[in-house]
Amino acid sequence: MAARYGVLARPCAKHTSLAASLYRLPYEPTGLVTTMALDDPVVITCSISGAIANREQCPAIPYTPEEYGAEARRIVDEGGVMIHIHARKPDGTPSYEVEDFRAITEAIRSEVGEQVIVNYSTGTIGVPVEKRIAYLRECRPEVAALNMGSMNYAKYSRSRKQFVFNMVFQNPFEEIIELLTAMNELDIKPEHECFDVGHVGSLEPLIDMGVLRTPLHVDCVMGVVGGIPPTARNLVAMVENIPAGSHWGVIGISRDQWLLVAAALTLGGSIRVGLEDNLYLPDGGMASSNGELISKARQMVEDVGRRPATVTEARAMLAIPARERSAA
């Protein structure tokens, strides 16, 4: 199986039947091949707050720096090693101001030190690239997310027969290259968020141009209306096209998240959960904290015979540029 499809390496016998069921495809994948394996540790990332959901939808979403810090402690205690941050003002309003990113980051560092990798969002609508680069430059997170293509970005309600929201998420190559250039200058590792197979295909030209440095850290974002539908077969298609030697993971949006977490774990990938992406546990109950979601994700990692990565392992696996760090 590993030789035929190219995604898995050295599969354990206990995983073979489950992984094989995900691979019963009507075609032979022809894309580039990753080298991640089932015996690799799993980088567990938490999307701590997002910019869309609010406390009317989920009371656990953090707004203030102190609440971000408390959530960071819960995340780290349950096995999370990277926190993806959208900044907010203390009233919950999304923010792209340096002072809010700085206050949140300092609160997280005060609570957990270097036990977690800080990852900033750069994805937004209507905020100039210069403003996004400003908070990267001033705060210098270890990782920053980089959206790899433009798309319709929507949420649809079947009960209402209408879109809850519907917008165009513009990420032209000019902006991608400008953000990448700044990240290279600042020694910030890009996390390439790919919402469809075409976004994965956008990586190769940037590598050829020399603006994108390998090895890559790629996340397959699945479940947004306008992007790729959230199925295990579609995850395989995306992974088959990721450039060789990359680290990859899955970001599942809404309640399909847990099925995608299971698929990624059996394919050798890493995972992200958190209140930005999904408010609910697999049993349908609303999460009381990000820590509760991370705890469930860690349990799933262990149940399939894998183990969570330590923060030291995660920094090495993601090829994060070395910096001086305070004692954790």
Image (tube, rainbow, N blue to C red):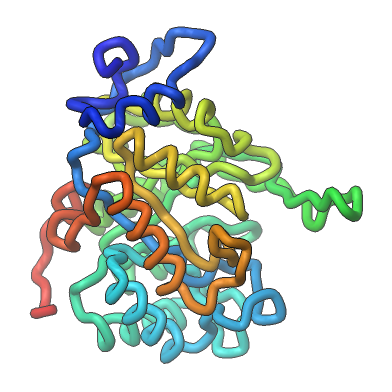
Q: Nearer the viewer, residue 264 or 11?
A: 11
Q: Nearer the viewer, residue 173 or 327?
A: 327
- Using the image, determine if residue 165 lies above or below residue 30: below
Q: Residue at x 48, y 32 (%)?
A: 235
Q: Is residue 259 above or below residue 273?
A: above
**Residue 225's x, y, as percent?**
70, 43
Q: Position of residue 35 (x, y in %)?
A: 22, 28
Q: Quadrant of the C terminus?
A: bottom left
Residue 99 x/y as whole percent: 43, 83
In the depicted structure, whether residue 274 falls above or below residue 167: below
Q: Is residue 141 among what the camera can see?
A: no
The answer to whether 311 appears left or right of 298 in the picture is left
Residue 123: horizontal and vertical position, in percent? Answer: 53, 56
Q: Is residue 232 visible?
A: yes
Foreground pick, 235 / 328: 235
Quadrant of the snapshot with the N terminus? top left
